[in-house]
Image: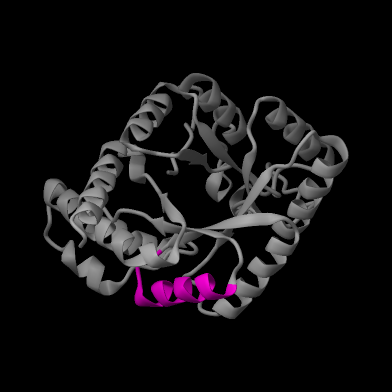
């Protein structure tokens, strides 16, 4: 389950959410690395805190945008010493144009080169390996390219992929193709849609996410409580539908609403127990 890191130094709400997700049945908490190139609390430090205080695994994201080789190597040594063995490697969102005079990108790696570097480092300088994961955009119009890149990532040492949310028929069909063609773990992406506005914003403004218009229309005129009920229903149904093609689920927490995620997990369990 993914939980957004704080945009300031206050970690109380984040840790409360992490405890709630653990209680709901999370196997691992994954934390983005300054998404959309906006500074947030460091994902690797939070992963270490989760391991120490919750006694559960964490999966920090690591982008190529902000670190050169030395900084990356130093961070990997620290993560290994803290017992963090799972990392999601991504190239990273570009710095917004308006901020490029103040914030500079690094991009010494792309995600494939970074995977090769981490794999080589583990063999030469560490007692054991990291378990490396990558992102898979099942919403891509040219999914052949995504599959080719995923296969290259697997060759460089990635053992699995977390997919973008499956909210369209095309994403579902691409997920089925990925299951057939990739020899790797697949965690199917699920993000609850919490309102009509949220659906339209994700579809038009968030890179890598598409929302089926049929889903968006279901939220028209719904208040918050009604929309949450619908989110539970739709998300648990998506989990049921993609279950034959994934090894697990990658649930993204919208706006810190961990209680909603807990409800979706419970609904999915009830559906599975009833054989639906």
Relative placement, left or right, of 271 versus 125 is left
Relative placement, left or right, of 161 versus 78 is left
Tell me which residue sits at (30%, 43%) in the image.
Answer: 261
Q: Is residue 149 above or below residue 228?
A: below
Tell me which residue sits at (47%, 57%) in the image.
Answer: 247
Quadrant of image for the N terminus: top left
Q: Measured from the top left, where is residue 136 in percent x and y?
A: 55, 63
Relative placement, left or right, of 24 versus 133 is left
Q: Measured from the top left, where is residue 260 in percent x and y?
A: 26, 42
Decide which of 181, 133 is in the foreground and name it.
181
* Residue 221, magenta (yes or no): no
Q: Measured from the top left, where is residue 108 in percent x and y?
A: 80, 51
Q: How many marks?
A: 0
* Residue 169, magenta (yes or no): yes
**Magenta highlight range:** 166-181
Tell me which residue sits at (64%, 55%) in the image.
Answer: 159
Q: How was the colour assigned to the protein in this rendering?
A: one colour
Decide which of 207, 170 is in the foreground and name it.
170
């Amino acid at each position: 389950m993914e939980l957004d890191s704080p945009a300031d130094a206050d970690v109380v709400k984040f840790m409360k959410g992490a405890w709630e997700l653990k209680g709901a049945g999370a196997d691992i908490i994954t934390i983005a690395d300054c998404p959309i190139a906006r500074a947030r609390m460091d994902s690797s430090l939070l992963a270490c805190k989760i391991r120490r205080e919750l006694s559960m695994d964490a999966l920090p994201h690591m982008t190529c945008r902000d670190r050169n080789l030395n900084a990356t190597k130093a961070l990997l040594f620290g993560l290994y010493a803290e017992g963090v063995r799972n990392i999601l490697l991504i190239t990273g969102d570009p710095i917004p144009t308006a901020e490029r005079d103040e914030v500079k990108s690094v991009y010494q790696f792309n995600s494939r080169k970074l995977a090769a570097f981490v794999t080589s480092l583990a063999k030469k300088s560490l007692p054991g390996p990291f378990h490396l994961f990558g992102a898979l955009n099942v919403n891509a119009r040219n999914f052949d390219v995504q599959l080719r890149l995923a296969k290259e990532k697997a060759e460089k040492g990635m053992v699995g992929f977390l997919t973008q949310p499956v909210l369209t028929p095309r994403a579902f069909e691409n997920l089925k193709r990925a299951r057939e063609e990739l020899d790797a773990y697949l965690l199917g992406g699920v993000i609850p849609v919490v309102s009509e506005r949220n659906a339209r914003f994700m579809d038009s403004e968030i890179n890598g996410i598409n929302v089926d218009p049929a889903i968006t229309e279901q939220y028209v005129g719904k208040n918050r409580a009604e929309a949450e009920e619908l989110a539970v229903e739709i998300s648990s149904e998506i989990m049921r539908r993609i279950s034959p093609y994934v090894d697990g689920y990658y649930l993204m927490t919208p706006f810190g609403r961990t209680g909603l995620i807990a409800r979706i997990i419970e609904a999915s369990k009830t559906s599975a127990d009833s054989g639906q």
